[in-house]
Image (cartoon, helix red, strand yellow):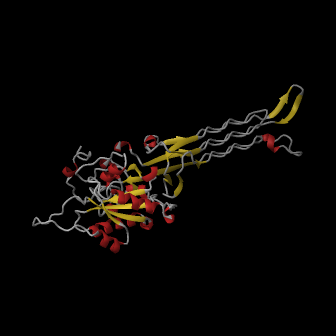
Amino acid sequence: MSANFIDYVKIYCRSGKGGAGCMHLHRAKYLPKGGPDGGDGGKGGSVILKGNRNLWTLLHLKYQKHIMATDGGKGGQSRSFGKDGEDKIIEVPCGTVVYDGETGEFICEVKEHNEQVVLLKGGRGGLGNWHFRTSTNQAPRYAQPGEPAQERTVIMQLKVLADVGLVGFPNAGKSTLLSVVSAAKPEIADYPFTTLTPQLGIVSYRDGRSFCMADIPGIIEGASEGKGLGLRFLRHIERNAVLLFMVPATSEDIIKEYKILLSELEKYNPELLTKARILAISKIDVPLIDEEGNEKPKANCQQLTAELGIPVIPISSLAGQGIDELKDALWTELNKEQNQVIEISHAPIDVTVIERDEPEAREEEEEGTIYLNEVEEEWDLDKYKGIGWDE
């Protein structure tokens, strides 16, 4: 399933050109000078994006690098219209954002089911010479050509739609929490980066109410520089109304880890810091033992709440402790008026950042080219055995 999750594609699109108008003079046995009767050319097909809530990935576009609509037909005699070109409809998941592939400028986004956005408009058909007849020019021997096609390379990014987004370091317990509060089945293991793709789950609340929670791969300090899995998955929490930070109770400094996460979010998009935040202290069922073998006191959540200015809730996903309190806090934040409307401004993307998996091809690139997920330091890959990096 993780291999099938594609949230970034770059494709070439071209609309259809308009058909040329016809230049024709009517001739009949008993009507040698029937006058102009050239018809109009057909309209070229458009490239249209259509939202589909049944899609959850851009996998169907990964190997479809060229998408082109058909051209309009030429006009004919007897004022016959040319055939219109066929529109090319591209179905995309709700939450797809489109950027210009050359400049990185934001073009459009598709958020609703069955919402249609014209990406490239087809060219208009040319007028036949019948339109140009006048009292002083009764036999025009010219017609309009059709409008040319539009073409551009676009980058499509999927930003999943969810109410709550989980943010935390690897092995903070995000996947375990999602598996407990929803029917989602994310991979759970005792090594870092078990979650390699975003996971969605529907959290059931009281009286049949529910909300959607998104789990993204863990981020680490320096992720904005490409360490770990980088920050590219943070696009999936840009639409979330509430950000749920998770720091394990076994952490040496909970406040420090929380501020590191905030710093990485700010480097990716400063607007993320304006969202409502809740801090969950996970794994409170794990005893804290110091070097001398004595049990250490656990974090004071009331003190952390006063210091950080956000709700701090202790939880244990395995033991089921604090889960109901966490749901109540999330539901309260989700229903606040200021969190109802989520408006995000899609900043232009840096098209010089190249996402690729073929390291042998990098030597041909210019120096200074940036690659996502590139790590400058040496990694002990034995720690990550089982996620495909050792193959």
Q: Nearer the viewer, residue 309 or 224?
A: 309
Q: Nearer the viewer, residue 146 or 188?
A: 188
In the orientation shown, which residue stands out farthest toward the bottom? Answer: 307
x and y, in percent, of residue 389 in the image:
25, 47
User: In the picture, residue 60 is in which quadrant?
Assistant: top left
Q: Is residue 377 left or right of residue 30?
A: left
- Quadrant where the image shows the C terminus: top left
x and y, in percent, of residue 31 in the image:
89, 29
x and y, in percent, of residue 388 in the image:
26, 45
Whether residue 303 is situated above or below residue 162 in the rendered picture: below
In the orientation shown, which residue stands out farthest toward the top? Answer: 29
User: In the picture, residue 289 is in which quadrant?
Assistant: bottom left
In the orientation shown, which residue stands out farthest toward the left? Answer: 292
Q: Is residue 35 visible?
A: yes
Residue under the image location 84 percent in, 40 percent down: 139
Whether residue 240 is situated above or below residue 131 in the rendered picture: below
Residue under the image location 65 percent in, 45 percent down: 123
x and y, in percent, of residue 339 in the image:
48, 63
Q: Is residue 220 left or right of residue 68?
A: left
Q: Nearer the viewer, residue 302 or 376?
A: 302
Q: Is residue 186 left or right of residue 52?
A: left
Residue under the image location 44 percent in, 67 percent down: 274
- Quadrant where the image shows the N terminus: top left
- The number of callouts visible is 0
Q: Is residue 210 left or right of residue 44?
A: left
User: In the picture, residue 172 is in which quadrant?
Assistant: bottom left
